[in-house]
Amino acid sequence: VPPWRNILMAMRRSARVMSEPTAGLQFFRECIRKPRSSGVARIFESVAGSGFGMLFLMKSSRARLLLVFILIFGALPDIAEGAQGKIAYSKGLVTVDAKPVALGQVVNEGQAVKTGEASIALVRLDDGSMLKLNANSELILDPGGVRLQSGGVFSEVQKKKTTHFYVRTKSVTMGVRGTRFFTAYGKEGKNGPDVWMCVEDGQVAVETPGNTKSVVVNPGEGIFVPSGKDVTPPKPYGWTKGLNWNMDPAKGDIVDHTSLKSQYHDLTDQNYD
Amino acid sequence: MILSYFRSTYSIPILATSVLWVFASRANAIPPAPGPVPGGAEPGADLRLFLDHEKFSYFGEIIGLNESDDRKFRELTLGAYYRLTHALKVGAFYGRAYGLRHDEDWINDGAGNWGWQNSNSRGEDFAIADVTPVGALDFLPGKNWVGEFKTRYLYDFFNGQQSLDLRPSLRYFWLKNDEPFMNFFFQLEGLFPLNYGATTLCEKWIYFGALYHARTGLDVGGFTATEWQTWSSPQAYTNQGGVPYTVTAQTWIIGALAVFQFDI
C-alpha cells in the first residue's frame, strides 16, 4: 500500500472517529491497546485519529475547519479504499485476529476474520458491500477488497463507478463492479489449493498472476482454477444450483450447505459414454 | 451284350446330363429364407478411455462381444467430443468393426446352398457424427440423476449404408461423503436404417449396468444387455424369386466395463 494511501485512509478513519462516537471510541481503544499492524502508517493513524478527536472535543474554530475538511475528504468515495467493515452477523465460533467477535465489531484492514466448524459470519463493508464467510473459512480485509485465505466466501458487492472490488485468492484475483459471486478453495494440490468461483449476478473478471488477459465470467457461469494451472473456460456448473445466496438472517437460513467436495463431481461433466 | 453296348455308349452323356440337370434345378429353385437364428447368453467387454482437455474430450473405445449364431463382434472407435455448451456435446469418430452381419450376408455359396456369411474377420470402416444433449435430472427422487440422449449418424464405408443410432440413457450416481461411489445406468438403443433394409428399426438394445468408482480416473463394473437384430431379404435373394422375409435374433450379453478418464 503506498504511503499516501495510508495517510488518506488515516484521515478518513479519523473522520469516522468523529462522526461515529461509538465506533470511534472502539477505534481509539484498539489504537491505544495495540496497533493493528506494525508500521509508521499505523502509528500515524492512531496519532491522527486521537489528534483530530481532541480537536473536535476542543470545539475550536480551527478544529471545526479541519473537521469539515476531513469529513468531506473522508466521504469521498473510492479515494482511499481502506477496507473496513463490521460484523453484521455471527454464529458459532467466529474470531477477528483470533479473538471472539461481538456483533457490530469493527474489522479493519489487515485483520483476519475466521470461522470455525458449523459457523458463519456476515461482514458489512464501509461501502455497503456484504461478505458471507462460510464455515472453516478465513479472510483478510485488504485495500480495495479481501484476501480469502481458506474456505469460501459469498460476496455481494455494491456498484462502484471508478474502481473494482477484489477478492484475492492464492492463485487468482477476481475484480468486480457490483455483483454477487461465490469464491471458494477446493482440494489442496501440489501447487496450492484449487479455486472455484461462480457468478450469480453481474460480471467478474478473473486474473491469474502469469496472464495479462483476464477471463470474464457471466451470471450463471463458474470457473475452476486447478492447482498450478490456468483458469478453465467459464461455464455453468451444476453444483452452483444449491448455493444459498441469502445474506439476510431475517429472510431465512443464511448457512450454505454446499460441500466443496461435491464441486469436483459435476455429475453432468462425467464422461462415461 | 446289348445292355453292355448301351452302357458304354450312353452312360457318360446321361451322367453328365443328370448332373447338369441337378445343378440347374438347384440353381433355379426358390431360395430359402433363413431359419430362426439361435440366441443365448454371450460374454462381452468394453473398455473406454477419455482424455479431457478444456472443452475437448478425446475418446477411444474397444468393444468385444459375442453375438448370436457364433458371431464375434469387435470394434475400435477413436475420436473426440467437443463441449459446445454445458448441456450439449458433439463428436466425430472413426470406427472399425468386425463381425457385423448385414442383410446381404444371406448368400448363395454358388452351389445352391444359402446361408449366413461368416463376417468375423471382415473389417468395416465407419465415420460417425455424434450429438449428445446431457442434463442433470435433479428433480427426480435422489437428485443425483443425469440424463443423456446420444444421437449418432453412422456411415459404413464397406457398403455405403447409413444409419441413425439413438440411445437415451438415465444414470444415477451414488455418492459417499460427496464423492462418487457407484453409478447405475439404464439405456435404450435403436439403430434406424436410413438407406437400406425393409424395416424401420433394425437393431434395438436394452442395457443395465453399474460402475464402481475405483479411484480418480477409473471406474470398473459390468453390464447386461439384451439385443434384438433384424435382417430383411437382400436384393440378390429376391431377384432369384425368394419370398421376402424378416428374421430376428435375440442375444443376451453379460459384460465387463471399464472407463478411464484423465485430464491432460
Image (spheres, coloured by chain):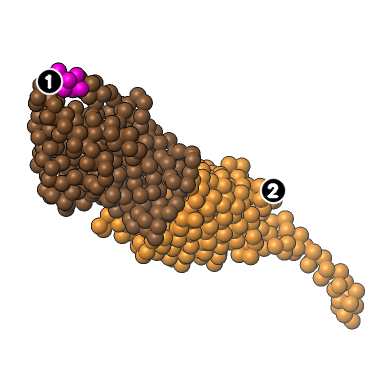
Chain colours: A brown, B orange
Closer to the camera in the image, B48 or A134: A134
Which residue does the numbered mark 1 point to in the structure image? A60
- Residue A199 is drawn in which quadrant? top left
> Over which residues does the magenta segment extend?
A60-67
Q: Which is closer to the viewer, label 1 or label 2? A: 1
Q: Residue B255's spot in the image, x, y percent? A: 43, 64
Q: Residues within 10 Å of mark 2 (few under 14, many from 20)?
A: few
Q: Residue A262's spot in the image, x, y percent? A: 30, 51
Residue A241 shows in the view? no
Task: Give the spatial CA distance, label 1 vs label 2.
Answer: 117 Å
Name which residue type carries label 2. Asn
Report the residue that reaches farthest toward the bottom: B1
Q: Residue at x 28, y 34 (%)?
A: A7
Q: Residues within 10 Å of mark 1 (few under 14, many from 20)?
A: few
- Residue B162 is drawn in which quadrant? top right
Q: Are marks 1 and 2 on the same chain?
A: no
Q: Residue at x 45, y 42 (%)?
A: A233
Q: Main SS of the magenta segment?
A: helix
Quadrant holding the N terminus of chain A: top left
Decide whether residue A234 is among the magenta residues.
no
Q: Residue A185's spot in the image, x, y percent? A: 31, 50
Label ID, residue B239: 2
Closer to the camera in the image, B139 or A53: A53
